[in-house]
Amino acid sequence: MDLLLHNSLTRHKEVFTPADPARVTLYVCGPTVYDRAHIGNARPAVVFDVLYRLLQTRYPQVIYASNFTDVDDKINAAAAARGVPIGVVTAETEKFYREDIAALGVLPLALQPRVTDHIPEIIAFIETLIAQGHAYAADGHVLFDVPSMPTYGRLSGHSRDELIAGARVDVAPYKRDPADFVLWKPSTPDLPGWDSPWGRGRPGWHIECSAMIKAHLGETIDIHGGGSDLIFPHHDNEIAQSTCAHHGAPLAHYWLHNGMLRVEGEKMSKSLGNFFTVRDLLHRAPAEALRVVLLSAHYRQPLDWTEKGLQEAIGALDRFYLALRRVADIMVDPQEPKTVVAALCDDLNTPLALAALHALVTEINKTEKFEELVTLKAEILGAGHLLGLLQQNPEAWLQQGGVNDLSADAIEAKLADRIAARKARDFATADRIRDDLIAAGIILEDGIGGTEWRRKG
RNA sequence: GGCCGGGUGGCAGAGUGGUCAUGUAGGGGACUGCAAAUCCCCGUACAGCGGUUCGAUUCCGCUCUCGGCCUCCA
């Protein structure tokens, strides 16, 4: 089955054909490490994790890199505000990011390069651009010469003229052309800086991705991903730098962009007070539920983060794990179901994949036949593996609770009392015990094999 | 102002030129001591106006409207 991906470059779905099927390369723009990851940061991490998982089922080697941008004015500001060295902010934020993203079931990446580890490569890259006549030094800066690249702005659809016409900021005097952008800029002694042919300075925003892609993946990669807000200027500028440095070789064949997150219908912003960090949300809801929310809309669509949506995600996982609990004793080898694979192969249609998973769950709930239970459980777990879901013990999900909740032992004791009461057909006592447990957030289910319990999500 | 992308049932959210999304909420039924869970059934959703077509929610145009980017941003 072909894998179709929507290529932002052509604005069409295209069949994915890697340049070298033996070595598929993927790069996704990572965070600038100055503050806790917010839920919007988590969307590309989770979405491209699903792509990574899907690619791994189809190709023997997938090399996936995502950067940490650890040189940036926002970092400088954050460090100054806290009165700590920049390295403290970046090291701490990177650690938090890794923890938060791992909690969301994102597979670890082998390549997570940092800008500060690639300064020589960046300087070399800039020197190449100057030598090729695509960049120039001026007033301690090095700028990319936009008019030297006729196809500049193709990804975003912006022409250089439109950019200049729509410019809302004053043009720096050292720029030859108003559209030129910074590759290298001077640093004052109090700011991080490195010696360079143009004096002590630091890299501009876009150059690090071009340099690190070249260093780790090569001149041309298969897939480049990131948030849609990066299309312009970041990705257009990456394309400009890399294409010009590499004699016209494209930077990436396929460009994928995820849509932006909103919160309760509003733009997420610190000033509105609706700025959720992943950490905050992990305290309020199970990580797996956050992941389901992030996959419940197609990655290119905007996603409205709502409390209702989060509760629905918890409900969906309850349904999945309830079905898996019923077949907990059956051992299977996970197998990717065709319906889910087909959904994901159609430009990562995760809502459709989730619908297909619901259909499998309905099927397993309906059947008593052992052979069907085996097949369906294998497929449900296989779907879960592709989506990064359903990898925990059903009881772990269904009985997870907060620290102040009733302990499992206490619940089991009450359950034993109730079973005795029911045996004696003392339903008044049995119902009173059940009501007590419901009040404590415990839901009971009397089945033919005994009574099961779970915590209300 | 420029460049993009949307408007689907109470809500969330796929998709399609002509019988079905799916989930959730709601109504009914089966099962249950009663529940819970599960299963079954139900409600004539495609912003508006034109056009193409035997037929459009799906294609084209216009209008209205929402959002992203153009400035740090996933």
Image: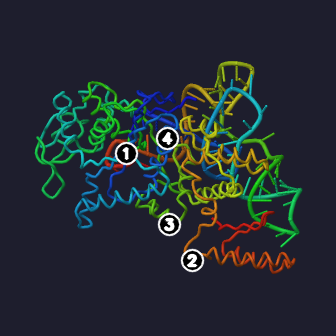
Nearest to the observer: residue A233 or residue A272: A233
- Mark 2–mark 4 Cα distance, whole angstroms, equals 38 Å
Which residue is under mark 2?
A404
Q: Earlier in the sequence, mark 3 or mark 4?
A: 4
Amino acid type, label 4 = Leu
The correct choice, above or below, for A420 with respect to A7 in the image is below
Chain letter for mark 1, please. Answer: A
Question: Do the residues at pointers 2 and 1 share their chain?
Answer: yes
Q: Which residue is mark 1?
A: A66
Relative to residue B54, is residue A4 depicted above or below? below
Q: Which residue is mark 4?
A: A51
Residue A173 drawn at (x, y percent): 16, 41
Classify 10 Å Cα crowding around label 3: few (below 14), some (14-19), many (20 and above): few
Mark 3 and mark 2 in contact (Cβ < 8 Å)?
Answer: no
Q: Earlier in the sequence, mark 1 or mark 4?
A: 4
Protein image colouring: rainbow
Instruction: Report if the CB atoms under discs 1 and 4 are less than 8 Å apart.
Output: no
| Three-letter amino acid code at the position of disc 1 | Ser
The residue wearing badge 3 is A283
Give the CA separation, mark 3 to mark 1. Answer: 26 Å
Q: Answer left or right for A46 relative to A394.
A: left
Foreground of the two, A320 or A149: A320
In x, y percent, where is residue A123?
A: 18, 40
Q: Residue at x 70, y 75 (%)?
A: A437
Find residue A55 and report its horizontal and vertical position in percent: 49, 37
Residue type at tag 3: His
Name the residue located 75 percent from the left edge and 44 percent from the top edge. A371
Q: Is residue A23 above or below residue A336?
A: above
Question: Which element carries disc 4, helix, strand or loop?
Answer: helix
The residue mark sitting in front, 3 or 4, is 4
Under tag 3, what secondary structure?
A: helix
